[in-house]
Image (cartoon, helix red, strand yellow):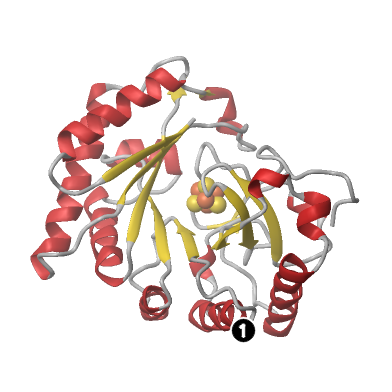
Amino acid sequence: MKTPGQMLTVTDHNRSFSSLTYVYPVVSRRAGGVSVGINLNPNNACNWHCAYCQVPGLVRGAAPEIDMALLDAELRGFLAELCNGRFMEEHVPPDVRVIRDIAFSGNGEPTSSKAFDEIVERVIAARDEAGLAAVPVRLITNGSLIDRPYVQAALKRLALAGGEVWFKFDAGTADDIQRINGIDVDPRTHARRLALCMSLCPTWVQTCVFAWDGVLPSQDLIGNYLAMLEYALQQARKNDPSAGLKGVLLYGVARPSYQPEAVHLQRLTPEELDAIASQIRDRLQGKGLTVTVSP
Ligand code: SF4
């Protein structure tokens, strides 16, 4: 924990201040309050390698075996501290003294833990027993493992508990995905994963945009991204005509990447981000999507 008097800030995503292994608090500009983060990847392992990733020492791999008793104890202890202790008063600025969410958002892909469904069940139980049933549980995911039955079971569980998914979707061609996310995948495969996700749990797409070597995202890149998003919506509606996305969370690179690709990336201005958001709104108008922007 931080020493009394220190405030968590929007730039403070350093999880090492806490002695906890799996649980960390953060004031999130995207969530708009205190987010209780759950990091299932203390080994800094992810199956993707995004150019903008802020995980130091990122390695390819999966989550390690999770110590369930420790995770339970950390989460229950920290929720009790937030509700009844002095943490809020001592560490959080007055205007954001609210628990916005409990978020699976760690140093790697959370669904790579084979115990993910059981973990979701435990987290929801801890939340409810703390009297925080109204606090949403969010899964921040690259969506790559959604074909696994235990991930689908977890998403259904999340939906029943009022949760939602933030699904990473940055580009619409294999080349752009390779460059941005460091992964070799057919974009239609990823779009179908998104469609499946939508059918299981309320879903937002999260999209990171930036300039690369001084060049803004091209009209081709944006057009291919939008086409693939539309394909995902069509796929979702083939099975369930009412299926839909809640919206698109468009964000910039507010904090520096810890990857070697960081040298290529430059932050967009708020105006440049807004222009891209307008294009998304125009193209997807009438499909009930909200587009939000976080510079
Ligand atoms: S999916 Fe997330 S944790 Fe994995 S490399 Fe990309 S940004 Fe980093």
Q: Quadrant of residue 273?
A: top left
For the question of whether residue 13 can be seen, the reply is no
- Identify the residue at horizontal 32%, vertical 51% (top origin): 185
Pointer 1: residues within 10 angstroms few (<14), some, or many (20+)? few
For the question of whether residue 71 can be seen, the reply is yes
* Number of marks present in the image shown: 1
Residue marked by disc 1: 129
Outermost residue toward the top in this view: 214
- Identify the residue at horizontal 45%, vertical 22% (top origin): 270
Q: Quadrant of residue 243?
A: bottom left
As helix, strand or loop, the secondary structure at mark 1 comes to: helix
Does any atom of ligand 1 lie closer than 8 Å to the CB of label 1?
Answer: no
The picture places residue 129, in percent across and down from the top left corner, at 62, 84
Q: Quadrant of residue 86?
A: bottom right
The picture places residue 170, in percent across and down from the top left corner, at 36, 41
Outermost residue toward the front in this view: 94
The picture places residue 192, in percent across and down from the top left corner, at 23, 59
Q: Tell whether 222 sits left or right of 49.
A: left
Tell me which amino acid carries mark 1: Glu
- Identify the residue at horizontal 13%, vertical 69% (top origin): 240
The picture places residue 151, in percent across and down from the top left corner, at 41, 75
- Identify the residue at horizontal 38%, vertical 19% (top origin): 272
Instruction: Give the position of the N terminus as an image quadrant.
Output: bottom right
Q: Tell whether 243 sits left or right of 134.
A: left
Pick whichever, 150 or 205, lies toward us: 205
